[in-house]
């Protein structure tokens, strides 16, 4: 029996309630747009963080924290696997440890009264009135110094979540490389025409060094060295991988690659030269040498199969040493001059490290307070440290973390960084497709960590906010997304 016309099922029309599958389509579209917004937001952080003088101003850092929080809210999270859960658990452990230490430093009255520095009792005796003390030697200073570390954690988490998609992972890397190229060109032009200025502010130091938008050339050297490494790996990733070509003798293979160079290859070569020259012209000794060593390591690991087949792995250390000396001599006259007059390491830093260790001995458990190094160091400053200048950083990020936040938290951070490098290293050696992503991230991370043992690049938000998303992306791409999909099925 036929139903009346008005009882017949109707197709969807305007003004009618959408069926469930249509509403599901709207939900998927909204999630897709939100994911695109999150990707673009993180790209903006990577590209713009170095711009305002390395983002060292607290107001600029607050903007990045808000933007990164929005990025995490918009990021669409695909089905999480066991390895994703492991990363998130590790991230949660580090975050929880950080909250506990900073919370203890800010608490009033102190949660651990026995660990309160004696400076509060001494100040109370001198002033003749009772002062409410805290674990931090400078009250509330950890609150004002927390922004950069929060932003660093959020950027790495955002890089991991967004970098799980292959297209978005490559976009993050290309934004990092492209923005670094723009800053390098500006740095070279500024050195030639406006050496007395950083952007619109007058510069009083490092007049003969490229700093670009950073204040310190050592940070600029690591930033441009990391970008040079990425551009070289990108250039290497565009080579032909046909088996018959890879079996050619080494000299014939090089000749074939040079003769078959495309316009894209020539442009990439020019960019690599510009980036390398910018790195060398910063005049940073450690930054230049470590960048060259990281580049050599990245190229060696990327071409390890070809080098192994031809029995040329043994020659890599010799070639690397020659190229490092040649690059420093030819492209970095400022660093070469500093090597001749100051040697490989100035004695003031060794004395600073010894003074910092004495500081750690007095504040071993919870430190003197996040951001208090520059207030605490004068009391421990050795007479061997040159009298000129103010030491606002320990020039060793590890020692400064221990001094400000205690040995237990520093151990947590050290284990976390070791885990990051292990995951990136395994991905670098195991992946075939898109191997450039974990390879670039591993050597950038190793370069940043190594240079931070003699300087402070990771403490500058303009550098860390550009690099940490790349490390997060590299960890996400350390495992093939195809394997993850197959396991999920």
Image: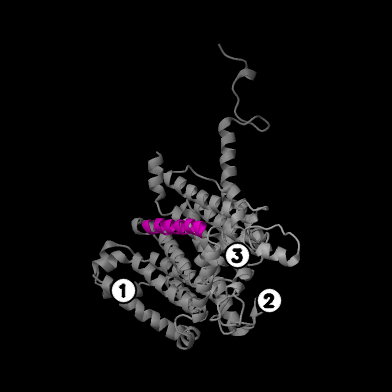
Q: Earlier in the sequence, mark 2 or mark 1?
A: 2
Do the residues bearing badges 2 and 3 touch, measured as CB atoms within 8 Å?
no
**Rendered location of residue 162, percent (x, y):** 52, 52
- Seen at 60% across and 60% down, the residue is 44
- Tell me the residue that label 3 is attached to: 49
- Kindly state the secondary structure of the residue where label 3 is placed: loop
* Rendered view: 351 above or below 71: below
Q: Nearer the viewer, residue 82 or 307?
A: 82
Q: CA distance from mark 2 to mark 1?
A: 44 Å
- State left or right for residue 115 relative to residue 82: right
Q: Would residue 466 be seen by someone viewing this image from the given angle?
A: no
Q: Is residue 340 left or right of residue 365?
A: left
- Circle 1 sits on which residue? 316
Q: Quadrant of the C terminus?
A: top left
* Residue 92 vs residue 347, the one in the foreground: 347
**Residues under labels 1 and 3: Cα distance?**
36 Å
Question: Is residue 452 on the magenta stretch?
Answer: no
Q: Earlier in the sequence, mark 2 or mark 3?
A: 3
> Within 10 angstroms of label 3, few (less than 14), some, or many (20 or more) residues?
many
Classified by dominant secondary structure, the portion drawn in magenta counts as helix
Is the residue marked by circle 1 packed among few (<14), some (14-19), or many (20+) residues within 10 Å?
some
| N-terminal label among 1 and 3 | 3
Q: Secondary structure at mark 2?
A: loop
**Horizontal and vertical percent position of residue 67:** 63, 55
Quadrant position of the N terminus in the picture: top right
Residue at image position (32%, 78%) is 319
Q: Specify the segment rendered in magenta.
A: 407-426
């Amino acid at each position: 029996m036929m139903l009346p016309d008005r009882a017949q099922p109707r197709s969807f029309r305007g003004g009618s309630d959408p069926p469930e599958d249509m509403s599901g389509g709207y939900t998927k579209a909204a999630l897709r747009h939100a994911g695109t917004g999150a990707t673009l937001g993180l790209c903006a952080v990577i590209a713009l963080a170095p711009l305002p003088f390395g983002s060292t101003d607290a107001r600029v850092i607050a903007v990045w924290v808000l933007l990164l929080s929005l990025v995490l809210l918009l990021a669409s999270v695909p089905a999480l696997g066991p390895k994703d859960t492991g990363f998130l658990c590790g991230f949660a452990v580090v975050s929880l440890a950080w909250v506990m230490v900073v919370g203890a430093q800010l608490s009033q009255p102190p949660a651990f009264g026995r660990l309160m520095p004696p400076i509060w009792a001494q100040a109370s005796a001198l002033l003749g009135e009772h002062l409410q003390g805290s674990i931090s030697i400078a009250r509330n200073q950890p609150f004002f110094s927390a922004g950069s570390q929060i932003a660093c954690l959020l950027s790495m988490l955002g890089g991991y979540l967004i970098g799980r998609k292959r297209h978005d992972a490559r976009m993050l890397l290309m934004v990092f490389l492209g923005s670094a190229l723009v800053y390098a060109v500006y740095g070279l032009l500024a050195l030639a025409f406006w050496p007395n200025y950083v952007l619109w502010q007058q510069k009083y130091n490092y007049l003969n060094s490229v700093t670009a938008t950073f204040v310190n050339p050592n940070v600029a050297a690591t930033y441009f060295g990391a970008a040079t490494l990425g551009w070289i790996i990108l250039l290497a990733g565009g080579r032909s991988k046909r088996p018959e070509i890879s079996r050619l003798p080494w000299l014939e293979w090089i000749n074939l690659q040079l003769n078959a160079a495309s316009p894209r290859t020539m442009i990439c070569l020019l960019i690599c030269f510009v980036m390398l020259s910018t790195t060398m012209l910063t005049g940073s000794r450690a930054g230049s040498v470590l960048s060259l060593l990281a580049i050599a390591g990245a190229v060696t690991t990327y071409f390890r199969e070809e080098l192994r087949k031809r029995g040329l792995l043994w020659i890599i250390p010799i070639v690397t040493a020659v190229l490092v000396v040649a690059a420093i001599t030819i492209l970095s006259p400022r660093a070469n001059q500093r090597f001749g007059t100051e040697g490989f390491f100035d004695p003031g830093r060794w004395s600073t490290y010894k003074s910092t260790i004495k500081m750690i001995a007095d504040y071993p458990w919870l430190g003197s307070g996040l951001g208090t190094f520059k207030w605490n160091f004068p009391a421990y400053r050795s007479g061997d440290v040159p009298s000129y200048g103010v030491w606002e950083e320990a020039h060793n990020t590890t020692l400064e973390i221990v001094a400000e936040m205690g040995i237990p938290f520093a151990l947590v951070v050290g284990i976390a960084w070791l885990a990051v490098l292990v995951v990136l290293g395994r991905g670098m050696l195991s992946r075939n497709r898109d191997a450039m992503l974990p390879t670039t991230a591993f050597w950038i991370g190793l370069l940043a960590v190594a240079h931070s043992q003699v300087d402070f690049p990771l403490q500058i938000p303009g550098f860390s906010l550009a690099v940490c998303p790349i490390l997060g992306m590299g960890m996400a791409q350390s495992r093939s997304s195809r394997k993850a999909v197959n396991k999920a099925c």
